[in-house]
Amino acid sequence: METELFGGTREADLAGLLKRFFGYESFRPLQEDVMRDALAGQDTFVLMPTGGGKSLCYQLPALAKGGLTVVISPLIALMKDQVDALHEAGVAGTFLNSTLNADEARRRLAGLYNGEYRLLYVAPERLVLPEMLERLAEWQPWLIAIDEAHCISEWGHDFRPEYRQIAELRGRFPETPFMALTATATERVRADIVSQLTLRDPKRYVASFNRANLTYRVIPRNQPLRQVLDVAKRHDGESGIVYCGSRASTERLAKRLCEQGIRSVPYHAGLDAGTRAKNQEAFIRDEMQIVCATIAFGMGIDKPDVRFVIHHDLPKNIEGYYQETGRAGRDGLPADCVLLFNPSDVVKQGRFIDEKTDEHERTIARQLLQQMVHFAETSDCRRRSLLDYFSEAFTDKNCGACDNCLEPKETFDGTEAAQKFLACLYRIRERSGFCFGMNHVAGVLTGADTDAIRKRGHDQISTYGIGGEFGRDEWKAIGRELVRLGYAQQTPGGMSVVELTQDGRDWMRSKQPLELTRPVVPKSKSSERRPRSERAGEIKCDEMLFERLREFRLELAAKRGVPAYVVFGDVALREMARDCPATMEAFGLISGVGDKKKAEYGKLFISEIAAYLEEKG
């Protein structure tokens, strides 16, 4: 169906194209508005969480408009999978990067000159080469989309200097609309993206950061291998990512998981490019259940069926944590995000920060780390804490999908503990004339016999040894909660100290009772999988048929040399296992079944479903 749109030019109906090529009946929030602005020649800024459908914002307009759409992406390793997925949907797309041999690159260039492609994926460093800029001038793209746009900002969590060169394109293509897309950005980063790309009065679209299908949990890390195995075994055979703080720990954990019968591979920047590509490919194609990775892995991962993300170590900041957890459940089905927290990680991260040469960078890094620690230790709703960070309000009293809402932390009358801690801050300063760090204060309270305490005479003050009811780590946790409450404050800088605030002095004089969170004790049930009926986004279906269809999909994908999710996602398989389509017409109603996939796979899946039903009587 053709309709008159956008200044009198004839454009295909967007909703019709959506169903025909991608098999979806309706748009997600904001998608259609973004597309219409782009087609009208308007610059756009698009912030949608991972799994929110950013790619369609430029893919569908590319089908609705003649000419070429250029997609700038740093994800060389994933361009092939992205283009394969487009081909499966019947969309003509290609990529140019260093993985192509000379003959293949020439063939694709010839196709671009002949107008055979609607979409071209290219990395920023290749795009700004003089010969590439000359070719672009000949091809005259009608839209330039910048994916992972936060990479252009020094305030973003994944700054890449080569992205700064993209701004040069504005001068060369003044009439071409730009679309900047990202999955995570604070208000400061958003403004920086618009400024760095010199977007012209852009329409700004900010979707909700709330990923309702994700369950967030923070549990004390005490037996990390067992804790990782617990999560992996609850998701038997399903894909997961474990983020580790060092290269060595990724390799060590992957090896130990393999020894326990869990198919796992490591991924980090220290591996050679061939090994990294092989390990990533094995994970994407479901040959490996788990990838143990540093933060070098994952930006832009298209795999939609990652069912769990575990942080083995404390992330550096909330923005990175949100981005990494966002790689779970991109298909909208339930997924688990588990952070294993140990206070020792705070000290370790602090040492890394101290190694930075720029004092401004160190100050920012410490502030971001402190926010991350507050998130890990808070007794408030995890979802509300995350959304607050991105300036989005969450008004529900109970999100129903985080540990603090499902299993509220135990509280206790912390009046005496708070008085002891704050009094200790006062006495230490009274004795020495200045303040000390959290570790030192906890040592004084627990009566530690150290050179630092003896040298300062802090073993002689009245609060020395009065906190025997708690260990040092517990006192530090109490201290951090008092900082969050505003009764104490922790100064920035390499020699961070804790000091009593005026609010803390006023509270001590008031003698008002104070409730504190009891330091967390591990519970075996703390990361249990919720019943399917209670998990947001779950599609109830015949689980045995779903598993059979997963195996059938894997066989088909292996024959075609593509990842399993490129054939169909889990959402489509679950709908098949629920509705059991017996005709091509019924099969075409399944989410994600476009015209090309219906023709190519319909009879195969209908036959497999029929065989299962016959076996089961």
Image (tube, grey):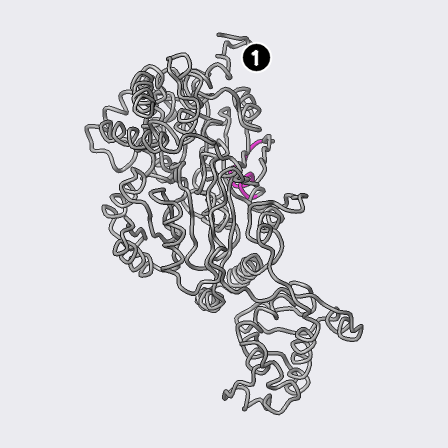
Q: Position of residue 225 (x, y in %)?
A: 36, 60
On the image, the x and y values in percent for residue 19 come to: 46, 17
Q: Is residue 199 rendered magenta in the image? A: yes
Measured as percent of width and height from the top left, residue 529 is found at 47, 47
Q: Residue at x 62, y 84 (%)?
A: 466
The residue that appears at 36% across and 43% down in the rendered structure is 239
Q: Is residue 218 above or below residue 222?
A: above
Q: Is residue 383 above or below residue 558?
A: below
Name which residue lies at 24% across and 51% down.
Answer: 272
Task: Give 172 or 535, whichever is nearer the viewer.
Answer: 535
Residue 133 visible (yes or no) = no
The amino acid pointed to by label 1 is: Gly
Pointer 1 residue: 7
Can you tell which quarter of the image residue 483 is in? bottom right
Residue 291 painted magenta: no
394 over 230 or under it: above or below = above
**Residue 569 vs residue 117, the one in the foreground:** 569
The magenta segment is 192-200
